[in-house]
Image (cartoon, rainbow, N blue to C red):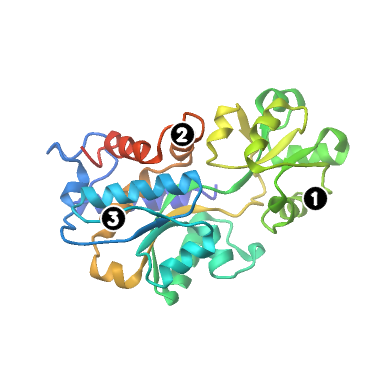
Amino acid sequence: MRHTRLATALAAAALLAAGCGGGGASGVGDGSGEGTLAAVDLSGATFRVGSKEFTEQVVLGEIAVQALEAAGADPGQLATITGSTNVRTALTSGELDMYWEYTGTGWSTHLQNEIAAAPRDEAELYTAVREADAANGVAWLAAAPLNNAYAIAIGRATGERLGIATLSDYAALVNSDPANATMCAAAEFLTRDDGLPGVAGTYGFPLPPVAELELSLIPAETAGGTTCTVGEVTVTDGAVSANDLVILEDDRDAFVDYNAAMTVRQEVLDANPRLAEVFDPIAAALTSDVMRGLNERVDVGGELPDEVAEQWLAENGFTA
């Protein structure tokens, strides 16, 4: 499977960081009652941390701010900026020092590469983006297992009734019975190379009947199974589990990976090399299931992102 190599690399990175005093997601802290991040001394350092505007990014940004505070640094308040291009510009211009970015966004949006040419192995994509972005003065710390990739989901009952568990199964339905293969999707997904056109090309099916909806409405409509049979989601969307949706297996690797990693201006990392000891173990603990649960607590449960971040860091032993 394409995910194994990245998971193995992350486990090794977490162990290395722990050996350097950075600790890891042990859930029990470092035995001092302070959490593992207290062993990483960034006293006197100041940073400017940013995020994009959607829930997952704000939660990740709050995790970063609170992790830096636990290591003795002064990160100030999180700067939430709308749009990938805008937050990236803030980083490269020096307005920000760091923010969490996704490998797929790095590949296509920031490095301007074709989606079709992206490596379909998580570790290879991460390495390609990290090495290419070094020329722009941007360092990528360890990538998290969490993958904010596009996905297509189906209501659990609908999937069981139709016998659909993979995108190949869905392709067969589109080709044999298109009237029962309606897809709920937002406008952008319908035209992006890494959206529906790319999936249809990879799996060999014509574009299905589409119900174009706002992204936030898609999970509930898909769960109902009346408006559409399947719907566009992202892998870490908290509404997936809340609506009892099942993500169809991408058995031909049509979707590009979007693993999250902390991106830092190289000059900032050079001056503060222990930043890797802060964020590499945190990244290793952030799986897709974990992130989906954190997103759900905010989007469905109504909790505040900073409180969700605070509890997660403490529960995983990073802070007291």
**Residue 293 bears which disc, if any?**
2
Tell which tag, 1 or 3, sits nearer the viewer: 3
> Are there few (<14), some (14-19), or many (20+) residues within 10 Å of tag 3?
some
Which residue appears farthest toward the bottom when viewing the image? Answer: 135
Does residue 286 appear to the left or right of 256 in the view shown? Answer: left
Residue 201 image-quadrant placement: bottom right
Disc 3 residue type (three-letter): Gly
Check if mark 3's residue and mark 2's residue have beta carbons within 8 Å. Answer: no
Disc 1 residue type (three-letter): Gly
x then y, percent, for residue 39: 16, 49
Q: Secondary structure at mark 2?
A: helix
Q: Nearer the viewer, residue 106 or 250?
A: 106
Query: Where does label 1 land, which residue?
Result: 204
x then y, percent, for residue 299: 50, 35
Q: Secondary structure at mark 3?
A: loop
Q: What distance separates the C-alpha of mark 1 from that of mark 3?
A: 50 Å
Tell which tag, 3 or 2, sits nearer the viewer: 3
Does residue 316 appear to the left or right of 292 in the view shown? Answer: left
Q: Secondary structure at mark 1?
A: loop
> Are there few (<14), some (14-19), or many (20+) residues within 10 Å of tag 2?
many
**Residue 20 bears which disc, if any?**
none
Query: Where does label 3 land, which residue?
Result: 76
Q: Is residue 265 above or below residue 23?
A: below
Disc 2 residue type (three-letter): Gly
Q: At x 19% / y 58%, what residue is drawn?
A: 42
Check if mark 1's residue and mark 2's residue have beta carbons within 8 Å. Answer: no
N-term mark: 1 or 2 = 1
N-term mark: 3 or 2 = 3
Q: What distance separates the C-alpha of mark 3 from that of mark 2?
A: 26 Å
